[in-house]
Image (spheres, rainbow, N blue to C red):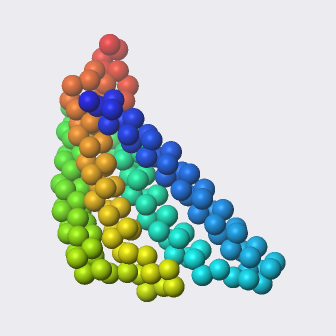
Amino acid sequence: MFPFISRISLFCGKLSSWLFFAIGCIIFFEVVARYVFVKPTSWVEEMSRFLQIWATYLAAAYVLKTRHLIAIHVVRDHLPESVALLCRLLALIIMAVFSMVAIWYGTDLALDSIRVGRASSTMLGLPMWMSEIAIPIGFLLLLLQVVAEAGELLFAKKSVSGEPRGGQ
């Protein structure tokens, strides 16, 4: 099960990077349209914001999987292995709790937007739920990755830093 979750996280990370690349292309298009052809568009700002929201939330699980979160190595590297393990587990528990809260309220927000029919105030008038649903989806992916990380930490023969424990 853990490798499957990791594959999903890696896929979402790659998708996120392509979304950020698409944002760059869209903004480049707007710059050319505006300053070369003097024909600015009405959709670039909203679409780039929409894609950025999705890219950011999709990348969260990938960032955890690849261990690119902010860490204080100066402290962690000088702790005994058992204390470092407890600190990592505590951090994963905090992430899990926060993810569950974000899933709960994010789902409530998206469902409320669907019920009310909330839309953006731009010319495109995109339904707000289309960007708001990224919150519970992204945090669900993060929660699954937290569970996978905790499982690997507790049941795999790896240390907190990802190295094999005790030379095994």
Q: Is residue 162 left or right of residue 88?
A: right
Q: Residue at x 19, y 56 (%)?
A: 100
Name above or below for residue 151 compared with residue 119: above
Q: Quadrant of residue 32?
A: bottom right
Q: Quadrant of residue 152?
A: top left
Q: Position of residue 40 (x, y in %)?
A: 69, 82
Report whether 23 appears left or right of 144. Answer: right
Looking at the image, can residue 102 be seen? yes
| 134 vs 64: above or below | below
Q: Residue at 70% across / 67% down in the picture?
A: 28
- Asked if residue 19 is positioned above or below residue 111 in the image, the reply reads above
From the top left corner, tell me how far across and down residue 124 is, in percent. Answer: 50, 80
Residue 19, percent from left and from top: 53, 56
Q: How many marks are shown on the rendered structure?
A: 0
Q: Residue at x 66, y 62 (%)?
A: 25
For the view shown, which residue lies furthest in the right direction? 36
The image quarter containing residue 151 is top left
- Residue closest to the eye, 121 or 21: 121
Task: Inspect this view and state whether residue 74 appears.
Answer: no
Q: Position of residue 145 (x, y in %)?
A: 30, 42
- Image quarter (top left, top right, bottom left or bottom right) of the N terminus: top left
Identify the residue at horizontal 23%, vertical 60% (top origin): 103
In what quadrant of the picture does the C terminus appear? top left
Placement of 91 over or under 166, stated as above or below: below
